[in-house]
Amino acid sequence: MQDINKEDPILRSFFDFLYIEKGLSSNTILSYKIDVKTFTEWIKKKDLDYLNVNENHINDFISFLFKKKLKSSSVNRKISSLKTLYFFLQKNKLIFKSPLQEVISPKKEKYLPISMSEDEVEKLLNSPDCSKKIEKRDKAMIEMLYATGMRISELINLKMTDIDLNRSIAKVMGKGSKERLIPFGEKAHDALNLYLSSREISTSKEIFLSNRGSKLSRVAFWQRIKIYLKKENLKASISPHTLRHAFATHLLNRGADLRSVQLLLGHSDLSTTQIYTHIAKQRLSDVLKKHHPRG
């Protein structure tokens, strides 16, 4: 089947708009392409044209997505992608009115990110054997994830010029090409310094390298994490991103204010950060049930 997104000049212009005007990352644009492709393939089967659909067609598409057992969060992401597409079409006078103007997004399921206890994090952090070269790198990466709360993509894209070891500060390029500075603690500093002192000279600008001396991939790092999870008998559901959740939750548990955590995580909306307060509250509730004489 032809890729409609590639063949259609209007859609090509839309994706250029996302990159040039909105400054979205290649990963985010790829998500848009997948969402738009799902929609354009669906309307093609209905003998429709995406420039001539109405609200009823959109609601039918949403029903189709739920029949495929997609979660509300996935459906909402696709609706959001289509709203951006039709905003672009309306802005460029290719349509008169967006068919999504009156569409109400489905309610999101209550979702709490999987987190880790401080003891579990400690086990994971202490698992790599720093006498081994590859585990020295892994130790530095895991320490940096937990010390900064950065995303996996932000970590593996860190360049040598992004780190100031003297001040223990990392410069991170986040979603939407937004730059932020994140301080990191002594243990992360020491682990990173130890790795860098033995890091081979490479033409790659990225800090964290594979055995071949090239930039380490997300998948390769995830495979390394799974080794330590198995070794320490930790939950299989834990992922590298779980350390980001743990970073936020543990800060809030210890009294950090929400606004500071928002800035450290690089969330543009405070409501995104507020999900972690629910985890912190759940932890307090669990403690109360476990230790209070009347449960």
Image (spheres, rainbow, N blue to C red):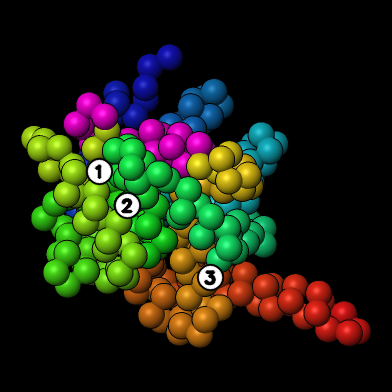
Of the pair 194 and 150, the residue shown nearer to us = 194
Mark sitting on residue 249:
3
* Residue 27 visible in rendering: no
Of the pair 256 and 262, the residue shown nearer to us = 256
- Give the farthest residue toward the front: 131
Question: Given the image, on which type of amino acid does mark 1 rest?
Answer: Phe
Q: Position of residue 233 (x, y in %)?
A: 63, 44
Count residues near mark 3 (Cα–Cα under 10 Å), then give few for <14, some for 14-19, many for 20+: many
Count residues near mark 2 (Cα–Cα under 10 Å), then give few for <14, some for 14-19, many for 20+: many
| Gap in angstroms between the C-alphas marked 2 and 3 | 21 Å
Q: Do tag 2 and tag 3 residues touch (Cβ < 8 Å)?
A: no
- Give the farthest residue toward the top: 1
Q: Position of residue 45 (x, y in %)?
A: 54, 23
Q: Do tag 1 and tag 2 residues touch (Cβ < 8 Å)?
A: yes
Q: Is residue 9 left or right of residue 224?
A: left
As for residue 221 lying within the magenta part, the answer is yes
Mark sitting on residue 208:
1
Residue 113: image quadrant is bottom right
Of the pair 124 and 30, the residue shown nearer to us = 124
Question: Given the image, on which type of amino acid does mark 3 rest?
Answer: Thr
Mark sitting on residue 140:
2
Task: Tell me what residue is drawn at x 19 percent, y 31 percent.
Answer: 213
Q: Secondary structure at mark 2?
A: helix
Span of residues in magenta: 211-227
Q: Position of residue 179 (x, y in %)?
A: 22, 64
